[in-house]
């Protein structure tokens, strides 16, 4: 599935790409897997769906969404683990969850065209200076929430702009 050691896939930037200018860095807990992005996210959301809650062991999941071509894996490509929850297979069948096979940290949700990164893995979280572009724009699948969120963000019953606004 992975063509070359330094290439994650044709939709991603390569470590050899000299035009790629790193804007943010992220890593798993043990730092075996590290990746960079060269842009701000196109959106950020808080998801309350059952799959996110079960796979993250949390009442919700915060994700920042990037185009795949703005992402590059810099280390640990051989330790990426994939899981497709729809097929219940540990394979890179898109969309899928991506994790570290050493420490088990969930790295991202890989979609067909997008990379849903988990902002808590980015270096800026340590400084407590979260860029505005990473701040969630809404809640999705809010009808499945565990508890009410008293914020001013729009709350959607399903996907943003494709479901009922609650």
Image (cartoon, rainbow, N blue to C red):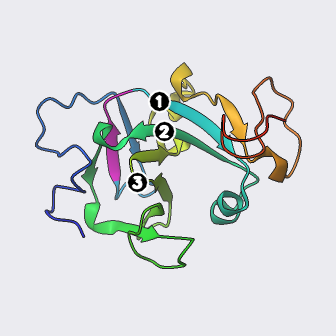
Residue at coordinates 13% horizontally, 38% vertically from top-left?
A: 17
Of the 4 image quadrants, the one containing the N terminus is: bottom left
Of the 4 image quadrants, the one containing the C terminus is: top right
Residue 3 visible, this angle = yes
Q: Which residue is mark 2?
A: 65
Q: CA distance from mark 3 to mark 1?
A: 15 Å
Image marks 1 and 2: residues in contact by CB distance under 8 Å: yes
Determine whether, in the image, residue 45 is placed left or right of residue 79. right
- Range covered by the magenta-colored residues: 34-39
Residue 145 visible, this angle = no
Q: CA distance from mark 2 to mark 3?
A: 12 Å
Q: Position of residue 25 (x, y in %)?
A: 36, 37
Q: Which residue is mark 1?
A: 42
Mark 1 residue crowding within 10 angstroms, few (<14) / some (14–19) / many (20+): few
State the image quarter where residue 165 is shown.
top right
State the image quarter where residue 138 is shown.
top right
Q: Which residue is mark 3?
A: 112
Secondary structure found at label 1 = loop
């Amino acid at each position: 599935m992975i063509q070359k050691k330094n290439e994650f896939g044709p939709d991603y930037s390569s470590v050899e790409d000299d035009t790629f200018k790193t804007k943010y860095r992220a890593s798993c807990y043990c730092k075996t897997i590290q990746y960079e992005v060269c842009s701000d996210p196109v959106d950020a959301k808080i998801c309350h769906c059952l799959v996110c809650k079960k796979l993250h062991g949390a009442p919700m999941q915060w994700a920042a969404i990037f185009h795949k071509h703005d992402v590059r894996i810099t280390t640990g490509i051989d330790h990426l683990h994939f899981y497709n929850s729809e097929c219940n297979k540990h394979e890179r069948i898109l969309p899928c969850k991506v994790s570290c096979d050493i420490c088990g940290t969930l790295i991202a949700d890989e979609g067909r065209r997008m990379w849903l990164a988990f902002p808590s893995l980015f270096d800026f979280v340590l400084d407590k200076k979260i860029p505005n572009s990473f701040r969630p724009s809404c809640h999705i699948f809010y009808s499945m929430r565990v508890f009410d969120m008293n914020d001013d963000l729009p709350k959607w019953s399903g996907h943003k702009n494709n479901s009922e606004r609650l």
